[in-house]
Each structure stands twice: as C-alpha cells, then as structure tokens.
Amino acid sequence: MAATSLEFSQPTPGAILPVRKLLAVCVGNALEFYDFLTFSFFAIQISHAFFPKEQTSHGLLFSLATFGVGFVTRPLGGVVIGGYGDRAGRRPAMMLSFTLMGVAILGLALTPSYAAIGIAAPILLLVFRLLQGFALGGEVGPSTAFLIEAAAPQRRGLYASFQFATQNVAIVAAGVVGFILSRSLSPAALDAWGWRIAFLIGAAVIPIGLYLRRSLPETLQPAAGEAAARVPAHVPVRLIVLSLLMLGAMTIATYVRGYITTYAQDSLKLAADIAFGASIVNGLCATFAAPLSGMISDRIGRKPVMIWSACCLILIAVPCFIAMNRMPTVAVVFAATAALSIIATAAAVPVMVAIAELLPRAVRSGALATIYAVAIAVFGGSTQFVIKWLIDATGSALAPAWYVTAALIIGAVAMCAMSESAPCRTAARAPAQ
C-alpha cells in the first residue's frame, strides 16, 4: 500500500511520546534482540545438540559460524522491511519484522537435535537463523526512525538511546535466563534440552509485543511519502562510507564484549554460571550508559561523545583482557566487562543518532536499516568466529583485544570526519529533515 493512501495517527511535533507508546517500541526491540542474542550465549550447548563431537571436532566453530550466517540476510531484511517502512509506515514495518522473528525463534526452539533427525537438524537450524537475520535486519531502521521522528529535536539523542538500552535489557534477560538454567540444571540437561527453554521464553512473549505495537502512532508524514514517490532522496556516498566504518567499529566492540560469555568458558575455563553472570553485568551497565550518553550528546553534540568514548575504549581494551587472563576471578572478569560495556555503549549511541539525523526522512527507515544491516552482516556476523579462529591460530587469548582495538582506530578516524548533526551544535534545522 502506498504511503499516500494511509491514514496516519501522528504524535504532535515536539511532544513527549506517552510512556506506553515508547514502551511498545522498546519492548518489541528488546524481545527481538533477546531472541537473536540467546543463540550466541548458548553457542556451546547448541554446538553439542546440532554438531556433536562424534561427527566433527569443530562443533563450537560450526555453531559460531551458524550464528554468523544469521547476519547474511540482515541486509536483505533492511532493504525489504526498511523500504516497506518508508512506503507503508514505520508501524507496519515493525509489526512485520516482529512477526517473522516470532516464527524463527519458535522454529529454533522446536528443531530436533542431530541425534534425532540427523543432517536435517543443522539444515533447519540454518534456515531459522537466516529468517532471524532477515527479521532483525528490518527492525532497526523503522524503530530507530520512529524514535527520532517522535522526539523533539533537543531529545533525539535520549529517545534514540532507548534503542540501545533495550538491546542491553535483552542481554540482561538472556544472561539471567542462562544463569538460572546453568545453576538449576546439570551440564548434560543443559545440553540436552535446557537451552531450548531460553528460546521458548522469547517465543512466549511475542504475542505481547504484537499487541503493544498495534497501538503505536505513525510518524511517517504523508507529504514526505508523496515527495519521496516523485523525487528519490539522495544519500551522499561519503555519509554511507563513514557510517559503515563507524558502525563496523561499534559492531565489533559490541560482539567482542558479547563474546565474553563464551570466552569465559572456552578460554578462561570458568563455570557457565560465572560466564552468564558476566553477560548480566554487560547488559546492566550498557542499559544505564545508553540514556546517559544520549542525554549528554543532546547537550554537547554527537561528535565529542563518540570520539572521546572511542579513544577511551582503544586505551583500555588490551589492559582489560590482560587482566582477565592473568587474574581470571569473578571480580576481575565482571569489572573488565563493565568497563568495556559502559564505554562502548557511550560511543555507539551518538553514532546511531548522528546517522539517523543526517539521512533524509523520506528514505530514513530503509537507508538506515540497510547501512546498519550491512555493517552488522560484515562485522557482527564474523566477529565471534574470527575471534575464536584467531585465538586458536595464534595461541593468544589477547586476540579479541587487538582485533577490537584495530577496528576502533579506524572507526575513530571516521568519527572525526563525520558532520555534526546535533541541533545544539548546528544551525536551525527542521525537526525531521
């Protein structure tokens, strides 16, 4: 359906979005990322179920590769669902992505093991991961566009920060579920069926998310849709390149700290409950850091926050991993995880806000979804596999730290070249250009 034929229920420009409506976006976003990240947290258990040792000696690598495959369809989801959000509206696009994620997560939870159905098991696992990637690729663009457009100019950073905050609520939720399951079940039970409970919990709340999202207002202006239909908006190549470099660096940082759950078990030889505890620390710290970063960027600008945070992360990444390896205690692992989480989130929030603000509104959903999905597909999908491969190939447990440091240096250069987009630092701009 064309955007020109829609009836829109728009929030008043500059008004504060009611908490219930804001929660509808946040809850849906959190649930989607919970479903997606749960696979990463249970990579070892999934490898035992679908890639048994008697069939291959590289079960964990195959499991991480399957996790990475889920990123392949993200760009396609960004183009299809993100573009749909520019034509039909942000709300229909968010409903579609959420529904597809529900199908994928339920399929993952119910797929029998290799022992039960043989080679069909990893094939089905792959299919549902591809569907997950497609759905999540189409989620970020419409939901971030919605938050930016629903906010007053001086609150865009804060509103968009909830995109990151809710992603990290998902990390906390997945970590809590993993911690409870690992403490309540034996390793054999966790391998056999316990990990499936985490996926079923995500599937059970899908109807709640759909119900909440149905009540959302629409922020895509009919006039903007009509203009876009007549004159395609132009996205500068420079903006695309810089966005990819910045998002690539932030993506690697995100998935390196997310890998700590697996790293603690595989490299540091810590118990599963401690590893899941680190994921809880990771999520909690990032949840609180995200809105703080958004508010500061609203006051002083996007570039100062992202550049200084990236530089701090460059300085502490290697020392944090050295500390974890020399003193693999609960306190040290949790402290290192907290430091990496807070600073990485502080850098990531203004990056995403700046890109969204600089994109033309008529193509914001599709362009943002596609740029973000490409960066995630290239860097996020490969990060955990590359880390594990580098550790095995070099014999160095510090490989993740050097990998993320190199990425952040490139990202920081791109941040310096990026235009400032915050209203507090620029000339008067329309609320949604």
Image (cartoon, rainbow, N blue to C red):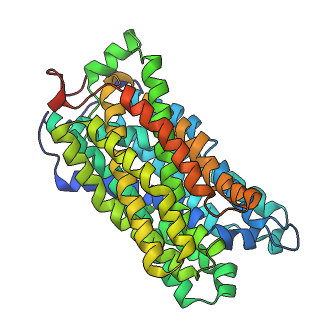
Q: Kindly identify the residue that appears in the image at 65 percent across and 51 percent down.
A: 68
Nearest the viewer among 42 and 350 is 350
Nearest the viewer among 282 and 130 is 282
Apparent side of residue 218 relative to residue 82 in the rendered image (left or right): left
In this rendering, does residue 18 appear at all?
yes
Q: Where is 62 relative to 15, above or below?
A: below
Q: Kindly identify the residue that appears in the image at 84 percent across and 62 percent down.
A: 119
In this rendering, does residue 210 appear at all?
no
Nearest the viewer among 63 and 110 is 63
Q: Residue furthest top?
A: 231
Nearest the viewer among 409 and 54 is 409
- Residue 278's spot in the image, x, y percent? 47, 72
Quadrant the N terminus occupies: top left
Q: Kindly identify the residue that appears in the image at 39 percent across and 45 percent down.
A: 310
Q: Kindly identify the residue that appears in the image at 13 percent across and 45 percent down.
A: 16
Total numbered labels placed on residues in the image? 0
Q: Residue furthest right?
A: 55
- Residue 84's spot in the image, x, y percent? 45, 31
What is the quadrant of residue 355 in the picture? top left
Quadrant the C terminus occupies: top left
- Residue 316's spot in the image, x, y percent? 43, 56
Q: Where is 90 relative to 419, above or below?
A: below
Apparent side of residue 35 relative to residue 262 in the rendered image (left or right): left
Apparent side of residue 344 relative to residue 11 in the rendered image (left or right): right
